Image (cartoon, rainbow, N blue to C red):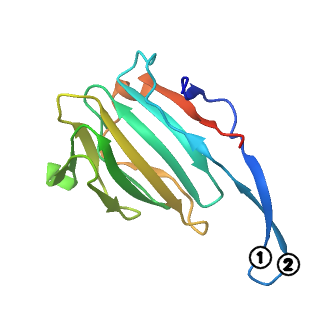
Amino acid sequence: MTSNTSPANTDEGVRIEEQAGADGTAATMTIRAFDYEKPADAQTSKSIVLLGRSDIMRAAVQVVREGGENNLHAHAGMDIFYMVLAGKVRFYGMGDAVLGEFGPQEGLLIPRNGAYWFESIGDTDLELLQVAAFDRGVENKRIDHQPRGREIERVKQFSAIVKSG
């Protein structure tokens, strides 16, 4: 297959079907099929490939070539599921307490307001699946427990290629 990522500019979707809602009324649903491939041309220490999103969730893969999250932070309105696809990661909590080290097919769930940061610790690039669920009744804001570093400015964003059939 050819390159499966392109610079992010829209959240395209493929309309596959209309389904009935729970109450029997017609509910429009956009189903998104996608391909993921690690971006080969990113010249930054971190890339984020958006796989898809809805009003209550977002799925992405973070590709970390060196280091990782640069500060301890939390999200007020978002629970986050992380699973390693490739490489190895170490997650930290308050006071740099180690929450765990994870390799492929391992990860953790961070509930909203859970303070964390992570770093790549393997010999290969870290590819980290991130699935975030949003509480629509809470303002989703990032809470920085430590000042952000300059690395955040070097994150390059991509969108997965949406499959048309």
Instruction: Check the picture and name the quadrant holding the N terminus.
Output: top right
Q: Quadrant of residue 135?
A: bottom right
| Res 21 label | 1
Q: Amino acid at mark 1?
A: Gly
Q: Looking at the picture, how far across and down is residue 38, in whole percent?
A: 43, 29
| Residue occupying the point 60% across, 69% down | 137
Q: Looking at the picture, how far across and down is residue 24, in whole percent?
A: 82, 82
Is 97 in front, or is 22? Answer: 22
Q: Looking at the picture, how far across and down is residue 22, in whole percent?
A: 74, 81
Q: Amino acid at mark 2?
A: Thr
Local packing at callout 1 (Cα closer than 10 Å; few below 14, some 14-19, many 20+) is: few
Element type at marker 1? loop
Q: Residue furthest bottom?
A: 23
Is 38 in front, or is 64? Answer: 38
Task: In the rendered view, tell whether residue 18 sits above or below residue 13.
Answer: below
Query: Horizontally, is 4 left or right of 147 in the view?
Result: right
Task: Estimate the spatial distance between the alpha carbons at disc 1 and disc 2, rounded to whole Å.
Answer: 5 Å
| Res 25 label | 2
Element type at marker 2? loop
Query: Horizontally, is 17 left or right of 56 in the view?
Result: right
Is 143 in front, or is 125? Answer: 125
Task: In the rendered view, tell whether residue 70 sits above or below residue 43.
Answer: below
Query: Horizontally, is 59 left or right of 63 in the view?
Result: right
Tag 1–tag 2 contact (CB < 8 Å) = yes
| Residue occupying the point 40% across, 37% down | 62
